Amino acid sequence: MGVNENEQLKLIRKRLGFSQADFAATLGLTQGGYSDIERGKNGISKSVKLMLINVHKVSIRFLEENKGEMLYIETPPDHLDIENTTTDPNATSDTKDRMIELLKADIQRLNSERALYIELLQSKDRTIAALERQLKK
């Protein structure tokens, strides 16, 4: 039996060096919701796949079929595989809704990164202050 896409997603996350919580945040998910996907309790939705494509440059062919490269460089060759091809007049609205979801997730990811950088800077500032106090003694 081959590797399913939930197991592939776990492999992708680990290769990219993310914890479940951090990776989930970049996809606009909670850690628990993401964990359910990795464990196979839930499938990978189209919106999560779009986030994987746009945020992490994941090849959907690699995710779904375990074929080809894990990541793409410039344009996603398999992006059209999950596009909404319906003739629904609200299709453009659906596309805009997906873009809004992607942008909100990107903002959430950037805010998480910003918080981590601020924490790192504060830690370094405290280290410098402690070292300066030791030098003055």
Image: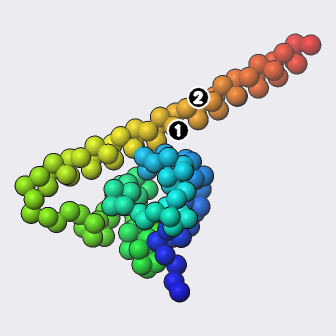
Q: Nearer the viewer, residue 45 or 96?
A: 45
Q: Nearer the viewer, residue 48 or 110?
A: 48
Q: Quadrant for the C terminus, please.
A: top right
Q: How many marks?
A: 2
Q: Residue at x 33, y 47 (%)?
A: 102
Residue designated by label 1: 113
Question: Residue 46: percent from the left, percent from the top?
Answer: 33, 61
Q: Nearer the viewer, residue 104 or 71?
A: 104
Question: Residue 22: percent from the left, percent from the top?
Answer: 55, 47
Residue designated by label 2: 118
In 3D space, how far apart are the residues under numbered discs 1 and 2 (Cα atoms)? 9 Å
| Residue 12 visible in the shown view | no
Q: Above or below — where is 132 with respect to 19?
A: above
Q: Which of the marked residues, 1 or 2, is nearer the chain's N terminus?
A: 1
Q: Residue at x 51, y 37 (%)?
A: 112
Question: Residue 9: percent from the left, percent from the top?
Answer: 50, 65
Q: Residue at x 55, y 57 (%)?
A: 35
- Color style of the picture: rainbow
At label 1, the amino acid type is Glu
